[in-house]
Image (cartoon, helix red, strand yellow):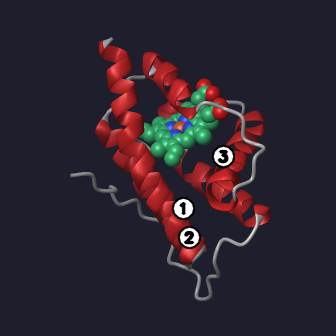
Amino acid sequence: MWCASPVRTTEPLPERHDIRDADDVRTLVARFYASVTQDAQIGHFFTHLDLSAHLPKIEAFWRMVLFGDRSYQGDPMAVHISLDQRHRMETAHFERWLGAWEASIDELFAGPRADMAKARARAIAPLMMHKVKQARDS
Ligand code: HEM
């Protein structure tokens, strides 16, 4: 059974609204990356990245998931299969990633789209882990 491993952040702000637009996605992604890039368990996955090139891709991905925006053109499964060859990815890493994603959302936003952002990540993460393992074994 998959569970998001808890990541402590600051206390939630008192008035949180839902994820409404591209600016909110940018805010969320920035918060999430501030957390994961410093994380003791998964921070090492991100050290090679030029965030100024990477973050716009992540924002476009989440705009696609949450708003149906079509600007994202990547292949996340292939990217993580290749990432796994650089740093082996394990279920515990995905759980940590999910914990940080959910903590970032909960810190900043609340509402149906915030719930959707958590649910979609929870659905994609095990699938991604499965594809990574499958590629490793083939
Ligand atoms: C252990 C969990 C994860 C880690 C450590 C991780 C880390 C990374 C890193 C380092 C990259 C950049 C790779 C590169 O360009 O060299 C990346 C790309 C990306 N990740 Fe993850 N990731 C994880 C899980 C996920 C999950 C669960 C999702 C989706 C829900 C996701 C969505 C993406 C997307 C959309 C990209 C951009 C792919 C592209 O270049 O088009 N990641 N991730």
- Mark sitting on residue 117: 1
Residue placed farthest to the bottom in the image? 14
- Mark sitting on residue 114: 2
Q: Which residue is drawn at 44% across and 16% down?
A: 85
State the image quarter where residue 84 is shown: top left
Q: Residue at label 3?
A: 61
Q: Residue at x 65, y 81 (%)?
A: 17
Task: Report the image quarter containing ligand 1.
Answer: top right
* Disc 3 residue: CB within 8 Å of ligand 1: yes
Disc 1 and disc 3 in contact, CB within 8 angstroms: no
Nearer-N-terminus badge (2/3): 3
**x, y percent for residue 131:** 39, 29
> Which element carries disc 3, helix, strand or loop?
helix
Residue placed farthest to the left in the image? 1
Residue type, numbered disc 1:
Ala
**x, y percent for residue 58:** 66, 44
Separation of residues labelled 1 and 3 (CA atoms): 11 Å
